[in-house]
Structure formats: C-alpha cells, structure tokens
Image (cartoon, rainbow, N blue to C red):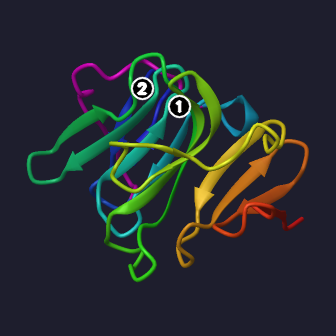
Amino acid sequence: YAFGEKSQIYVSRDGGNTFCEKVQPEGFPEVEFHKIDGANKTEVRADAGRSGIFYMALREHGLWKVWYNAESDELKAKRLTKDKETVYAVGLGILTPEGAYLGENKAIYICGSIEGVYGFYRSFDDAESWERINTNKQMFGNIMSIDGDSRTFGRFFLATGTRGLVYGEPVSEEKQMQSII
C-alpha cells in the first residue's frame, strides 16, 4: 500500500514492483499523505494481522477506517468520528487482557478533540464510544504520535515533541502516566 498527495491510495499486488491507484471511496476527504515526519499532518495505521484494514487520523476530517477488498479490488471507507471532531494521531493496541494482537479487533487510541475536548482517548468498540484517558494536567506538549501496546492491555505510548516518549497504563489515580525516556 502507498499513499499520495491528494488522498490517493495505491495497492501493489506484486510485492511492491508496481502500484495501481484505487478509486477513492465516496465521501473520503482530500488530504496530503505524502509529507514526512512533522510536516505530515495525517497518520495511517495498518491493522496488524488483518489484511487491507487501515485507520487514518485526518486532522479536521476526523478518524477514518479504510478497507481494501482484494477480491473485488475496491476500497471502502467509513468516518469513525463525528463532524467537527479532530484527530491528530491514531494507534492500535490489544483489545482485551486475554486477547491476541495479531488478527483480532484492536483497541483504538487517538490524540484529538472529541465533543470539543482535546485529549487522549481510547475505544474498545471500534469508535462507537470514546473514553478520555488523560486529564487537563497531562497534556505533554506537542504529540507527534500515539500507539497502543500489542502485549499489555490498556498501555499506550505517546511520542511527544518536547518530553520524549511517555506511556500510560491503568493504575491508581495518583500515578497515571510514567516517562520512559
């Protein structure tokens, strides 16, 4: 899979030797996927162990889930957040304490604004509902990326622009986030 400057999505069926542009799903917004590092204002996460499924943080366009169906050679997409909800970063983590990461549904972690409140959120039901997992005292500056842990239920990581890499996990109220760098 590859992504272009005007929402183009390309698929290779020969191990990356050639790519074919796919028709964009109806209603999918025009965004720039082609910039790198801090200049890229989108984030794309593949659903590990599940072919053709991507979660896309598209800033003011919200969070999207995109599916590529290899049999029909088509893309489908669904916006997972409401209008006016902004998503800056998205990550995926293990969904249940007993679950497996590869091949199963994932917990979704985002950095963004849900119902007008900026923060870090998680969803255990494919974005049907969101739970804020930080407080107003835990903002950590410019967030470059967020990701869930693939082995430990509830743990997530934040790549900050100024404070290094921090993580959060379910623990007591007074000790919600720890710095690992």
Q: Nearer the viewer, residue 59 or 17?
A: 59
User: Looking at the rendered structure, which numbered label has been put on residue 19?
Assistant: none
Task: Point out the residue furthest to the bottom here.
Answer: 98
Q: Residue at x 10, y 53 (%)?
A: 71
The image shows residue 139 at horizontal and vertical percentages of: 79, 40
Residue situated furthest left in the rendering: 72
Whole-percent x, y for residue 115 in the image: 50, 25
For label 1, the SS is loop
Q: Is residue 93 above or below residue 96?
A: above
Residues 5 and 161: in front is 161
Question: Magenta: predominant secondary structure element?
Answer: loop
Left or right: residue 74 versus residue 174 is left
Which amino acid type corresponds to the residue marked 1 in the rendered image? Phe
Q: Is residue 171 left or right of residue 86?
A: right
Q: From what the image shows, is residue 150 above or below residue 71?
A: below
Indicate yes or no whether the magenta region holds residue 155.
no
Magenta residues span 16-34
Q: Position of residue 47 (x, y in %)?
A: 39, 59
Determine which quarter of the picture holds residue 48. bottom left
Query: What residue do we see at 46% from left, 43% from top?
Result: 130
Kindly identify which numbered label has been placed on residue 7.
2
The residue type indicated by label 2 comes to Ser
- Pointer 1: what residue? 33
Q: CA distance from mark 2 to mark 1?
A: 6 Å
| Residue 30 rendering spot, x and y as whole percentages | 42, 18
Q: Residue at the spot x=35%, y=70% of the render?
A: 49
